[in-house]
Image (cartoon, grey):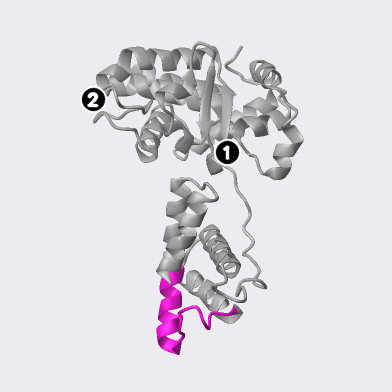
Amino acid sequence: MKQVVEDFLKHLSVEKGFSPNTIVAYRNDLHYLASFIEAEAARRGWIPPWAGFDRQAMLSYMLSLKERNYAPTTIARKVAAAKSLFGFMVAEGIMSANPTKDVASPKVGRSLPRPISANQARRLLEEPSKLFTLEARRDKAMLALLYASGMRVSELVSLNMDDVDTGNGYVRCFGKGRKERVIPIYVQAAIAVKEYTKEVRPHLAHGPDEKALFLNLRGGRLTRQGFWQKLKGYAKSAGLDAHVTPHTLRHSFATHMLSGGADLRSVQELLGHANISTTQVYTHLTSEHVRRTYDKSHPRAK
């Protein structure tokens, strides 16, 4: 069963272009499902393991998740992963019927992090300047760039040197499904990144072949977890809510842009919220239009 899972994950990676982080999440969710199916198969004599897995078995799986006290959001995610796997197995002819077809997905209310105010964002962004270390100067550039662009933290730490054009004020990143987007950034953020690359990064890099933009003290690419810990420290010292996360800055970016008069379609483009329908709605927007909207709306671009 776990080999089928790995085949499915390869399909998601190669054919669907899912990110490594998404693949890791799917693997964790589906390996638990595979273990559940294999245990049921051993108990009931199913050969192959999924031969007897039907709607009732799927409901039993969902009950087992609930009994393990998983959060509703986690259960919903694991069920969604199972539905995707069984859909793949039917499409590949491995199973003749999808056992999840008539199983309703758990309803989970979507909660967004509370945005911080523009004044709180300013305080947070100024916090690294109170320290005089290489790390603090790197963090100043990262915070400025994150708030300037609304990128996901995974996109931020994945940036390479040639992904940022500080002269023209743009950053290029690759979002979900490896979809590329180019985002304008305000002047102060571009300056912070330029100062980091010129004055700090050379002291962190162990050689000229390192492509990563933001480096840790060992000379390797800084991780999401590493940046998150730094952000928590700065949020605390700035007197902000302890639950400020990288996504809080992304949400604040969107909120502040909309409050400043940006139209929803431009913000969707900047954030990379691009499913098929939303992409079709705003593909007519030109880069210059997005640039003008950004300069008009971002609280730190004025």
- Bin the neighbour count of mark 2 within 10 Å (Cα to Cα): few under 14, some 14-19, many 20 and up: some
Dot 2 falls on a residue whose secondary structure is loop
Task: Name the quarter where the N terminus is drawn.
Answer: bottom left
Looking at marks 1 and 2 on the same chain, the residue that comes earlier in the sequence is marked by: 1
Q: Is residue 242 above or below residue 3?
A: above
Look at 67% across and 21% down and name the residue there: 287
Viewer-closest of 17 and 269: 17
Look at 42% across and 53% down and name the residue there: 24
Q: Which quadrant of the figure has residue 62?
A: bottom right
User: Is residue 57 among what the camera can see?
Assistant: yes
Q: Which residues are magenta?
A: 32-54
- Residue under circle 2? 206
Left/right of residue 256 with respect to residue 85 in the rendered view? right
User: Is residue 245 among what the camera can see?
Assistant: no
Task: Name the quarter where the C terminus is drawn.
Answer: top right
Give residue 84's position: percent from left, percent from top.
57, 62
Give residue 127's position: percent from left, percent from top.
40, 21
Q: Which quadrant of the figure has residue 116?
A: top right
Look at 47% across and 40% down and name the residue there: 243
Label 2 near label 1: C-beta < 8 Å? Answer: no
Q: Which quadrant of the figure has residue 298?
A: top right
- Residue under circle 1? 114
> Of the residues shown, which amino acid type is indicated by label 1?
Arg
Give residue 85's position: percent from left, percent from top.
54, 64
Viewer-closest of 153 and 21: 21
